[in-house]
Image (tube, helix red, strand yellow):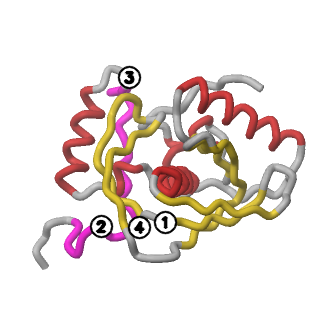
Amino acid sequence: MTVQPIRLFGDPVLRTPAEPVVDFDAELRRLVADLTDTMREQGGAGLAAPQLGVGVRVFTFEVDDVLGHLVNPVLKFPDEEEQDGPEGCLSIPGLHFDTKRRMNVVAKGYNSYGDPMQVVGTGLLARCVQHETDHLDGVLFVDRLDPAARKAAMKAIREADWYDQAAPPVVKLSPHRVTADPFGLGR
């Protein structure tokens, strides 16, 4: 169990969809332990394997004293209720932006031994599960912002002391519509 360096915005691994886990072995359990230790050390609510440079579908979380992990998650939303509030990311350190998410989520997947499990979350836990699952799909929370907020977020990222100007970022639009006219084209 070791704290690992976290990949920062601009690293291509954060934009690459992760592969499903097929081997539920000691290596996977070590990865879950590293994710947990790193998440706790950095004070995060969740951490996905791509944030450590590992392209597999697993994340850890710790919200409201509930510590866990989920392998190969699949999300379902029991209703249409939304929440809007500040969201941050350990791969975009020090920056927070209001982000819309679903209020309630049911996530099904497996534990690190391959046993089926389910996480039912509301509020912050639901936000965390959606955020970390997005990481597994190569999506960052700034992709979910409306165009004006995304522009402000990109400006703040470019001005951050950790940002590497030599590696231009890839901005990927969320596959989920945030407005009826996401590009402001008026068509």
Camera-side mark, 2 or 3: 2
Location of mark 4 (residue): 175
Name the image quarter holding the N terminus: top right
| Residue drawn where x is 29% and y is 55% of the image | 145
Q: Amino acid at mark 4?
A: Pro
| Residue drawn where x is 54% and y is 58% of the image | 137
- Examine the rendered structure and indicate whether residue 175 appears above or below residue 79: above
Q: Residues within 10 Å of mark 1 (few under 14, many from 20)?
A: many
- Identify the residue at the far front of this view: 65
Camera-side mark, 2 or 1: 1
Say whether residue 34 is left or right of residue 82. Answer: right
Q: Amino acid at mark 3?
A: Trp
Q: Amino acid at mark 2?
A: Val
Q: Is residue 161 magenta?
A: no
Q: Secondary structure at mark 2?
A: loop
Location of mark 2 (residue): 178
Q: Quadrant of residue 20?
A: bottom right
Q: Residues within 10 Å of mark 4 (few under 14, many from 20)?
A: few
Instruction: Point out the stretch of residues depicted in magenta.
Output: 163-182
Work out how far the residue at label 2 is from the one at label 3, CA to CA, in angstroms.
28 Å
State if disc 1 and disc 2 touch (CB < 8 Å). no
Which residue is nearer to you in this view: 55 or 43?
Answer: 43
Does residue 82 show up?
yes
Location of mark 3 (residue): 162
Query: Which of disc 1 and disc 2 is earlier in sequence?
Result: 1
| Type of secondary structure dominating the magenta stretch | loop
Work out how far the residue at label 4 is from the one at label 2, CA to CA, in angstroms.
9 Å
State if disc 3 and disc 2 touch (CB < 8 Å). no
